Image (cartoon, helix red, strand yellow):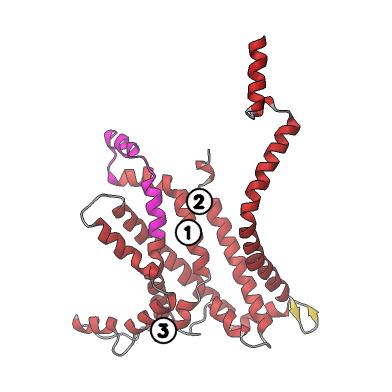
Amino acid sequence: MESSTIEKLNNADQGDPSSLSRGQRFKKEFKKDIFYLIFAIPALVYVIGLAIVPAITVVYDSFIGRHGFTLANYYALPSYGLYGALINTLLVSVGALLIQLFIALAIAMVLVKPFKGKKAFSTLVIIPLGISTVVSAFVFSIIFQAVGGYANSALVGLGLRPIDWFYTNSSSLGVVMFSDFWKNTPLVALILYGGLSSLPPSLYEAASVDGAGSFNRFVHITLPNIAPIMSIALLVRGVSEFNIFALPLVIIGYHPLILNTLIYENYSSSLTRNISYAAATVLLAIIMLYSIIVVKLGGAKDHVR
């Protein structure tokens, strides 16, 4: 009896949760939460001050017209080219995302294997991340020039006819998509590489013993286990893709329009500023919907323990 009493007293002195009353446990957890909150305050201030408050202000102003609260700004959006800008944004964003995902997955699967020259290959893969978006956009605008561009010079060298890459909307958006893919694929590759590196080799060894080939191991082991990591990559890059601005502005200007160039073009005039707020609200709604879909389909819940 005495030994058990002494043991309880020792546990209480050492902060054993089972020996504390409900009030003491609550007080201890509250102090711990406050301690963590103190370190999170700068991030919270940053997010609230530079993201949440401006977003709420823009949404509110999008409903303000000459005579107060109104939906006139949204009714006017189609006449400013909303539908075309929306389609172009979806084409560029979804197309670039799919290209980045497939190429990045291939790069990550190469990087996860040991081979001679891996460091040099890794350096080449990461280089685009260090180049400014405006600089890379300017470089690609030179590459795809109709006259004297490097792309057409290569076609002529192969005996093919040169192409006016900015003659149609489709080809112009294709140039933007290609440029964006080159610039941002390394980020997706690094995220997927981290996920692939965390997979235990024992899974593949057991599958090989059971007779599973490379394709079956990829489909039934690799993809299901990196699904949460892929969802993170798609979420991070998807939000950035829908917000793409500097790259198309430098390469194609305001034609064809995408949502962000439409927003910027109308924001520059005080007469149409509320129109740009309405377009920005539409873009915000698309990003929120996309984020919800990715989180729901990402498979993160199945991997939470």
In space, the residues marked 1 and 2 are separated at their CA atoms by 9 Å
Q: Nearer the viewer, residue 1 or 124?
A: 1
Q: Secondary structure at mark 1?
A: helix
Instruction: Give the label on residue 115, or none.
Output: none
Q: Which residue is mark 3?
A: 168
Q: Is residue 81 above or below residue 43?
A: below
In space, the residues marked 3 and 2 are separated at their CA atoms by 36 Å
Residue at 52% x, 81% y is: 257
Classed neighbour count for the residue bearing mark 1: other residues with Cα under 10 Å, few (<14), some (14–19), many (≥20)? many
**Residue type at the position of mark 2:** Gly
Quadrant in which the N terminus appears: top right
Residue 121 falls inside the magenta stretch? no
Instruction: Give the label on residue 234, or none.
Output: 1
Dot in front, 3 or 2: 2
Q: Is residue 23 above or below residue 191?
A: above
Whichever of labels 3 and 2 marks the residue nearer the N terminus, that label is 3
Q: Which residue is mark 2?
A: 298
Which image quarter: residue 71?
A: bottom right
Q: Nearer the viewer, residue 48 or 5?
A: 5
Relative image position of residue 124 (x, y in whole percent): 29, 65
Question: Dots 1 and 2: beta carbons under 8 Å?
Answer: yes
**Residue type at the position of mark 3:** Thr
**Residue type at the position of mark 1:** Leu
